[in-house]
Amino acid sequence: PVLYLRGLSPNDFVPALEGFFGSAAGLSPSTIARLTEAWRAEHARWCQRDLSAVDYVYVWADGVYVNVRLPDTDGAQDRLCLLVIVGVRPDGTKQLVAVTDGHREDTESWADLLRDLRDRGMTAPTVAVGDGALGFWAALGQVFGTTRVQRCWVHKVANVLAALPKRTHGDAKAVLGKIYLAETRAAAVDAAHEFASEFAAHPKAVAKIIDDLDVLLTFYDFPV
């Protein structure tokens, strides 16, 4: 909540929170102010917690843009970007590792976040999953150089479909699914070549798969 409440007065949130909790909740501006201070303190403790006893074997990273706008150094209004990392423990438990705000998904913003996690005891995850944003991958190499790269299939499928005529989307989704749902890496490679053959008339879409095939299939090196 503190990420959305920053810089806004309690009066701005009374109608919204009354709609959520009900008008009988007694959410006066002074109550909202007290809640905001409590949330800030809770968030600060969470951002400083020790990570040395937690083993995240996989992490997912993404930049999530919201409609809040902050002034840039030149006075322009940039949309706020939340840098989010979700981790997975060896037993499969997923946990929110980090969320912080920034103006954009640049390398230094991601590097600052990753260095903070490292300095609080987080060890290098085995695999990191994310889209093609260069900022995160450059930062990952600086901070956790041993972590393997896995490109996100959700983002990749969306990017491939954007390079194809809409009439082909159904067939393309079916063939793409055969790649990332294949039982083995060899079968996935075969399915990728099938996609390249079937959609050869659309080289930009094909290149998005073939050029990134190694980092799209990293997950085959690890337990199902």
Image: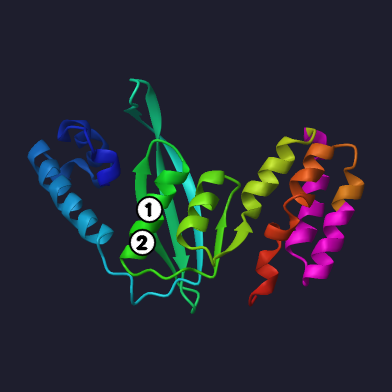
Q: Identify the magenta region.
A: 166-194
Q: Which residue is mark 2?
A: 117
Quick check: can you spot residue 93? yes
Instruction: Tell whether 202 sits left or right of 173.
Output: right
SS for callout 2: helix
Task: Please tell me which residue lies in front, 63 or 126.
Answer: 126
114 up-or-down from 126: above or below? above
What distance separates the C-alpha of mark 2 from that of mark 1?
Answer: 6 Å
Q: Amino acid at mark 2?
A: Leu
72 up-or-down from 97: above or below? above
For the point 44% across and 37% down, the residue is 104
Q: Is residue 168 magenta?
A: yes
Q: Amino acid at mark 1?
A: Leu
22 up-or-down from 216: above or below? above
Q: Is residue 221 magenta?
A: no
Report x, y in % for residue 159.
68, 41
The reply to whether discs 2 and 1 touch (Cβ–Cβ < 8 Å) is yes
SS for callout 1: helix
Report x, y in % for residue 126.
54, 70
For the point 39% across and 61% down, the residue is 96
